[in-house]
Structure formats: C-alpha cells, structure tokens
Amino acid sequence: MTAPLPKRIIKETERLQTEPVPGISAQPHDDNARYFDVTVQGPDGSCYEGGVFNLELFLPDDYPMTPPRIRFLTRIYHPNIDRLGRICLDVLKNNWSPALQIRTILLSIQALLGAPNPEDPLNEAVAKQWKDNQAEAIKNAREWTKLYAQPKE
Amino acid sequence: MKFGQEYQQALANEDFPKEWRESAIEYKHLKKCIKKVHKELQSLGLHPDTLRRMSEWVGDSQPEHQDSKDYYSATAPTLSSVPEEFAPQLRVLVDGKTGMPLDATLAPETKSALQKLAKHEMMSAGRRDYLRIPQPPSNHAVRRSSVVSVLTEDIAEEPEDARWVQLPLASAKNFYDMLEPSVQELEVLREAETAKLEEDILDLGDAVENVVQPVREGMEATRKMNYRDLYFWREMFRLYTEKPIFYSGTEARRGAFTFTEAKSRLQAYDTKLREIGLLDQMKTPQARLAAQQFLDLNVKILRIMHFQEMNARAMTKILKKFDKRTHLEGNVFLKDIGTKHPALLTNSGKQGQLQSPGGFANSIARDLNAEIASKVLAIVPQPDDWDCPVCYSMAWKPVSLGCCKSVYCIRCIIKLQDEGMKRCPVCNQETVMKADGRNINFEAMEFLQKYFPMETRKRQKENEKAALVREHGEAFVKPGCAIQ
C-alpha cells in the first residue's frame, strides 16, 4: 500500500531537521513519515510563556493539495482551540495554499498563541470569558499552562 | 598561555603580510604603558582602589545636590566640556588658595603630592576658569579622555575656595596616543583588504563563468569543455552553500562564525571535496584552475578574518587591563571606539550563548559572503532555485500564471485545475483556471534545458507518465505492466 513518499515531503522533513524553527520541533514517526510529533513553545510575553505544547500533525495523501491535519494534544485554555485540541485557523481551512508548508503552519499556530482571537471562537466558553473578563481569562491560561504544559525534565 | 604571548606568537607564526603586522595592535608596548600609568599614579599615592572608590562615589551622588549646591554636584567632574586635544587627566577639587585636595579620606602623602601638582597647574594655568558651575554632561564631546574626580567631603565648610584643577597624566596620554593610530590603521587596512578581496571575487566570477557556460547548440565540437563540468561546479557550490563557512543565515543562528569555527568549516569543506574527488573529475585545466582560485579565495578571507579578530580581542583586553590597573575609565574609550568604528570591537556575547567574532571579522565575513553568493555562486544555477512551489521538484515544464513571478511545473497547475483550486498558491490571485498552453514559460524552459539537461530529461519522463495516469488510471503504468 505504501506509495513512495513525495519529494516535497522528503524535502520539507529534511529542512525541518537541518534548519529547525526556533521554539518549534517536528519529528516524523519512524513507521509513518506522514505523521509528526510536534512541540511548540508558548511565545515569550504571552500567557502561554514557559509552556511546551505537544501537537500531532498528519499529512493526508493529497497533501499539499489539502492542508495538514493538526491538533493540540496538550490541554490549552485558548478561545480558538477546543477541548479536543482542534484549531480554528484560516490557513488550516479555507485559506490553505499548497505553497504553505509544515513550517509556516506551525509558525502560524505559534502566532495564534500570541494573539488569541475571541471574535472567531471555537471554544465558546473560553471566548466568552475572554470577552467578559480578559484579566481572569489570561490568569486561567497561565494556570493551565503551568498545570498541563510543563516541559518534561 | 597568557593572551599577550598567544597574540605575539600568532602574529609571528601565521602567514600574515608585513603591512598587516605593522598595523597590528602593539599589545606588549601598551601593556608596558599601563605599567607606567600605574607607577605614575602610585607615585601620586593614588592606588587603583582609591581611584575606584572615589569615582564610584561620584557616580553615586544624589541628584538633589545639583540643585542646591552646584559645586557639590556629581556632574562637574564627568566627561563634559572636554576639548578635542584633551589628554587623560585627573580632575581634583582643591582649596583655591593652598591647592590642598579637599578629600578628607585621602592619605596625607597623597594629598601633598596632589597639592604640589595642583599648585603647579594653578600657577601655570593662571586664569583657568573656575569649574564651579557644572555643565550638563554631553557625551558626544568625549574624546580619548579619562577623568577621575576627587570630590571632597568637607567641601561644605569652605565652599568659596574650592576649585577644580586638572592634572595631566603623561603616561596615560602615551597609552592613548599609541592606541588611537592603531585603531585607524586597522580600519584602513580592513577597507583596503576588503576591496582587494572583492576584486578577487569578481575575477573568480569571470573565470567560473568561462568554464561553466553551457555549450551552445552547434558549438559542441569547438568547445573543449564538457558540459559535465557544469555539474561538478554545481555540486561544489551546493556543498559550499549547504554548510556555509563564514556566515550563517539560518533562523536559529544568524551571524558570522568565529575564526575557529570558520577554519574548521573550511577544512571540513576541503576534506569533503577530496573525499568525493570532485576536483580530479574536472575536465579542463581552466576549470581546475578556477576551482583552486575559489579555494584560495576562501583561505584569504579566513586569514584577514583571523587577523582582525585577534586585533579586536587585543584591543578589548588591553583596555580592560587599563581599566583594572588604573581605574581611569578606559572603558569610556572603548565605548567611544564602539560608536566610531562599530565594526572593530569584539562582541562580548550580548545575545547569550551566541558567540560572534569581533567586529571587522564579522563585517568581513558578512560582506564577502554576500559578494561570493551574488558574483560567483549565482553563475551556476542550483536546481533548488527552480523548484515548483507546490511539489518541490524542478518546475518542468515551467508555467507562469502571469499574476506573480512564481514558476510552477505544468503537472501541478493541471492538478490545481482538477481540484478546482482557483487561486495562485503564492500570490492568492484567481489565475489558475485561466492557464493554458500559452502560459508555458518558454524563456525559462530554454534556460532549464541549457543548465539542467539531466534533470529536465528526467522530469519530462515523469510528466509523460503522470499524463498517462491521469488519462488511463493508475493501473495503466503500474510496474509489471506490459508497456515497460
């Protein structure tokens, strides 16, 4: 069943290893080169600072015609990320372009942590909190980060 | 090994041209000079500790004093109102009549030594201005001057008679007189050497262009060179850009490598070239000559980098030493150099663990790296430059959508059309559906055929196969099928 890995995926993977993006790592599984373990560090100055978030990323068969599928494994208090870790991000859906890549998508996700957008919520409860009492919401996000997203020793 | 010895040895042993050596910082002499300054200060009874204590005390003065009693202010003895030809000097607040220093904490013998000097100064200077009213500090006026002020504690008792007296320090002046020309010579040397190397790079560019020009049609017989040389050069330059030697432009690490790093990188590159035997495979003597020229150029860059880095280190070290031994604020001079010749000093690792080589070395590495990339490496196009932004394979046959400069391969555009993706993947304009045979970029096609004959042939076969799959289904071209 295994079709040869497209050149594009090979090249992207290589470059992710040789020139990693600071604060982001993506490691393909040995038995499935389309499945990546990803970690993203919370951006400095955000309420996720100090946290290390695990994500899973999968490149579907028709990648790059369709976007990678990606979700958070680490719990996170964020208006655009739901309880299952699904992410509401335009470039992962309608605004996907085959010229985007794993690296740019992960950078967008890191940027999303730095700039939560409660106007376009995926997690209604968190988004409401964010709009009603932002200070409290940020406090929650910090607490969750301490609770769930601590880097492993 | 002490730095002084290390420095002298490197200067002597490395293969530096004579005029370079003459411009080098005279570390040994400067060190002797510091000893003299130290002695002179000691003869005045001013130990480094005393000086430091006093200058620190000035620095810590509370600003409110400035308003009530301006002669008491800390701003008076700072480096303001310093004339251009100023020599390093002590500025001491003394009794206006007797010339007795007014710092109660000074030892008696120090006081009398300073008093003697001060009296002499006051007599010779005659109508020197009283520096009772401090001028606001203006840092731009700072020119190789170093001032340590000695403030008094009992000044409040007889303020009318207090005055600032400037005591020149001959030996410290020597130190700066020796250092300053070196700094300028180094700057001149850097400019000259960089210009020379840029010439070399241009020459090399011509040489490379000569040997890699793809064979024009109908000229095959007259050209001695083989088009395979093009591939050797490409591999040579690909390895060169893959692990850059002098300057790294990756996200994780941007900046010049230190001399030691660059040296080992160049060695690794050389070893790699030998391992794959690339140079021996070159067909024409001109090509081999140009390759040698390329390697020599890198060695030359490395050498000037080494020299400049050593000097930057010597400069930082000697000024630190000056500071430590005399507390005459050599670091002010250091900062001054930093602003005037930002390229010269070693960057003391401000960005944490990222050690960058010093100044000139850094800018040489960056400038020449860019120069090589644009004047030499660019002559041999790399296949990566012609990747289709969608499949990351060579954009063959090349298609331009007309909305932006991106070049796609024809297969990817067909695929995008099949999927109904209307927008150009790079610039997002709705141009995909309109594309047809007229969008084939013939100029790029000719170029690719010329520079990448092997790649384009391979891609052509892949395309034909993909077209068959599209038309007749996957099974039609499965391995094992009879059409092979």
Image (spheres, rainbow, N blue to C red):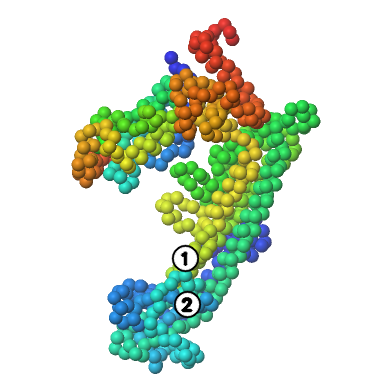
User: Which residue in the structure is indicated by mark 1?
Assistant: B335
Instruction: Say which quadrant the N terminus of chain A sits in.
Output: top left
Residue at coordinates 53% horizontally, 58% vertically from top-left?
Answer: B343
Drawn side of residue B271 relative to residue B82, left or right:
right
Question: Callout 1: residue from which chain?
Answer: B
Q: Which residue is mark 2?
A: B82
Q: Quadrant of the C terminus of chain A?
A: top left
Where is residue B336 shown, x and y percent of the image?
Answer: 49, 67
Q: Nearer the viewer, residue B92 or B67?
A: B67
Compared to residue B153, the image places residue B309 above or below, namely: above
Of the pair B39 and B437, the residue shown nearer to us: B437
Question: Which label sits on residue B305?
Answer: none
Mark 2, residues whose alpha carbon is within 10 Å: few (<14), some, or many (≥20)? some
* SS for callout 1: helix
Point out the frontmost of discs 2 and 1. Answer: 2
Which label's residue is closer to the chain start, 2 or 1?
2
Q: Position of residue A117 (x, y in %)?
A: 29, 38
Which residue is situated farthest in the right direction here? B222
Q: Residue furthest toward the top?
A: B482
Q: Mark 1: few, some, or many residues within 10 Å (few <14, many ≥20)?
A: some
Q: Are marks 2 and 1 in contact (CB under 8 Å)?
A: no
Residue at image x 40%, y 34%?
A105
